[in-house]
Image (spheres, grey):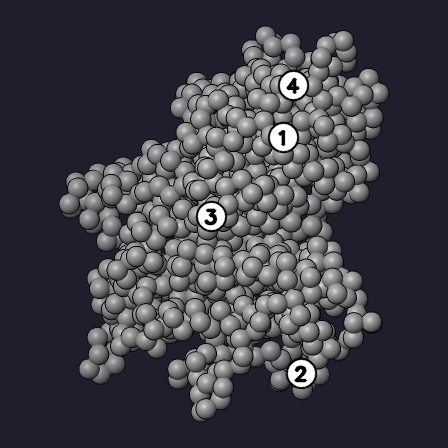
Amino acid sequence: APVQTNEAALNGNGVQKPEPRLNDPDTLARQIVEKLTYSIGKNPASARKYDWLRATTLAVRDRIIDHWFESADRFAEEGGKRVCYLSMEFLIGRMLRDAINNLGLTEPVREALARYGVELDMIELLEPDAALGNGGLGRLAACFMESMASTGVPGYGYGIRYVHGFFRQEIADGAQVELPENWLVHGNPWEFERRNASYEIGFGGKVSMIQEAGRPARQVWRPAERVLAVAYDTPMVGWRGRQVNTLRLWSAQALDPILLDAFNSGDHIGALVESNKAEAITRVLYPADSHQAGQELRLRQEYFFSSASLQDIIRRHLEENDNLSNLADKVAIQLNDTHPAVSVAELMRLLVDVHGFGWDEAWTITRATFSYTNHTLLPEALEHWPIHLFERLLPRQMQIIYAINAGIIREAAQEHGYDDGQVAAISLIDEGNGRRVRMGQLAFVGSHAVNGVSALHTDLMKQTVFRDLHELYPDRIQNKTNGVTPRRWLMEANPGLTGLITEAIGPGFLDDIEKIIEIDDLADDAAFRERFAAIKRQNKERLANVIGERMATSVDPSAIFDIQVKRIHEYKRQFLNIIEAIALYDQIRSHPERNWTPRVKIFAGKAAPSYVQAKEIIHLANDVGRVINADPAVRDLLKVVFIPNYNVSLAEIIMPAADLSEQISTAGLEASGTGNMKFALNGALTIGTLDGANVEMLEHVGEDNIFIFGLTASEVAQRRREAHSGRSIIDNEPMLREALDAISSGLFCPDSPSRFHSLVSNLYNNDWWMICADFKAYWDTQRTLDDLYTRQDEWQAKAVHNTARMGWFSSDRSIREYARDIWKAGPGQAG
Ligand code: T68
């Protein structure tokens, strides 16, 4: 049966649509108190801060709903093509500030609350982050959701409603401790449970061929287990509230929450076994980025949300169309990495087994519908599932994968004369170490477009992971360089800078961020530079206060704020940064008479709980900070701080406060980076390698305004082929040697002197991440920056150029490119 549409719910049978909400402070104040009274059961006198947050959220939410229904009705009327963004992760952060900013309600809400003596800025801080992601990949999905709504693309996000998001990090005695995150404890006022949008998801069981009279034989899957996927919708508000899209997250529930037989026979615990097992699927986010989590539960999560999303897409399509043959004209499905790649097999199953399509037509529809984004080339991060596990959990999908594979191999052998070696390279099945399904290959062959996330990364994709498939399908890979939303990362995070730019060039850049280039000439205007610098100073003071409060460390806002915040990973080379800090510490102590430029090195980021080396790097940063910060010999010339629990909210404070942004990955390994863009947009200078989107940032900001050092991607590949090791470099580089000796001596960890021995010996033996190879170039570039910082005019001019020239790195631009080149959907597209 068709679901009730919004239209029918509101004005069917003569029921009037509610009056649209007014946005003046009087009305807002009245309605916030109404929510407080009738939805929360408090009066202004007894309300606590949290009640005010909830009441304000509910009053704002009413306004979003008006726009939400308008958007839904408009899409239904236009009958255009929809975009479904399937992602295992959406790293959204807080939603209130973003929503009221995009609705233009920031000042009226502030004023309304002030009437009751409540500060908007204070209650905003009480909202928990929606931390349903690990890092760049999840945050990109969140920026894309916001940009789809802002650029008028009818976008639907599909993902998982994890009960526990990304873990909370504490530092105890210098080491990372992981604590469970619990964002839903106080309820979630942004979401709407949709019991009518729920689907059965099967696992395990058997496949059998059935032959019914008058019909062709077909395969029927009889799963051994079934769970229910229930939808929760969150509105995603675009700039100026013009469009509100939907993020639909799935929650797992047992079909039979209580097994009555067991319950009635007195087994009250046993009666809950099913529901515990079902709910486990959406209980927690896997905290490993850039590393495959090989557990069965992870594969269950992937299939669970893929199948639920596809069933939902098909149901909506059939409500509006006669059949599924025109699916690809009406929906584009983007696979965010390979986590939803099983969707390729699942859509084939739904088309062939459930909706009666022939194989070839189903395959044409499938390929025309899907496209796939790759986010990494690291071999340890590429997903591949053991065949026996896949077969046991998803027997029909496994058969389908074999059939897809047979088709591809036939094509390669017959039409292109592939030999056995070439066939093995493109096969969906890795016959090497235990037979495995290669999810990247599956996503590739099941899509009409495959993209990388920066120009360099896309080139390397063609040369490495997908070299053979690229040869077979040379038109399939394209580039879509990442971007970040300027609403959250400039307007909301940096209202001071936004105000200054608005004063200088008017508000046009708010609607079209590329107009921010109009401040470029003001880099030569001393008065403008001074105001630009004063805002940076205020943002640094705000961060210094956070550091003072959370860590009882005082840092001087007039020092260079040199910041590296991101997931902790060997390839991102936080270790290189720490070694440079130790070498600098050494030099300051040996040459106290020199004119050192004061520096605060700031780190933040989480390590995957099972990633030993990454946790050692966190420990080292903390140990080094403890020693340096307490040493009177360095005075205020150098501080090293590690801020615990990096998340989106903390990033919003950090990005505007940086002088220097560290983007120092081993070249060829960071697919794009997006923190690099947030920093530069907020006027930080970048020290970085020619990696990921740094390469394109160099092209946009110009070589005078970015500080590039180190080996290139091809030089790194060359050295790795030559089995490069660090020993000879260390022997010839006293500063590096002394820094490593200091670590090995236990200077920073007298309680446990051998703590970092394996970190250091890896450098001597192999230097896989080119830390030794790049040390000298990094050190020299840092000293150039020290010197530049003493010439504030020059530094600030470069900072202005960075902000002015970063408009292209908006996720609005990324989304317009996807819409035009891949999805053929959204404004100005035929669809
Ligand atoms: C990041 N990848 C890339 N992965 O590392 C980064 N992985 O260069 C890029 O800018 C960003 O994606 C956006 O394209 C990730 O963040 C993960 O978080 C991840 C999570 C689970 C499994 C594997």
- Quadrant of the snapshot with the N terminus: bottom left
Q: Earlier in the sequence, mark 3 or mark 1?
A: 3
Instruction: Kindly identify which residue carries mark 2.
Output: 263
Inter-mark Cα distance, 2 to 1: 73 Å
Q: Which residue is mark 4?
A: 790
Q: Mark 3 against mark 2, which lies toward the viewer?
A: 3
In this view, 447 is above or below 462: below
Residue type, label 1: Glu
Say which amino acid is labelled 2: Phe
* Mark sitting earlier along the chain (3/2): 2
Q: Which residue is mark 3?
A: 508
Q: Nearer the viewer, mark 4 or mark 3?
A: 3
Given residues 689 and 356, the one toward you in this image is: 689
Tell me whether circle 1 and circle 4 mark residues in contact (CB < 8 Å).
no
Q: Which amino acid is tagged 4?
A: Thr
The quarter of the picture where residue 780 lies is: top right
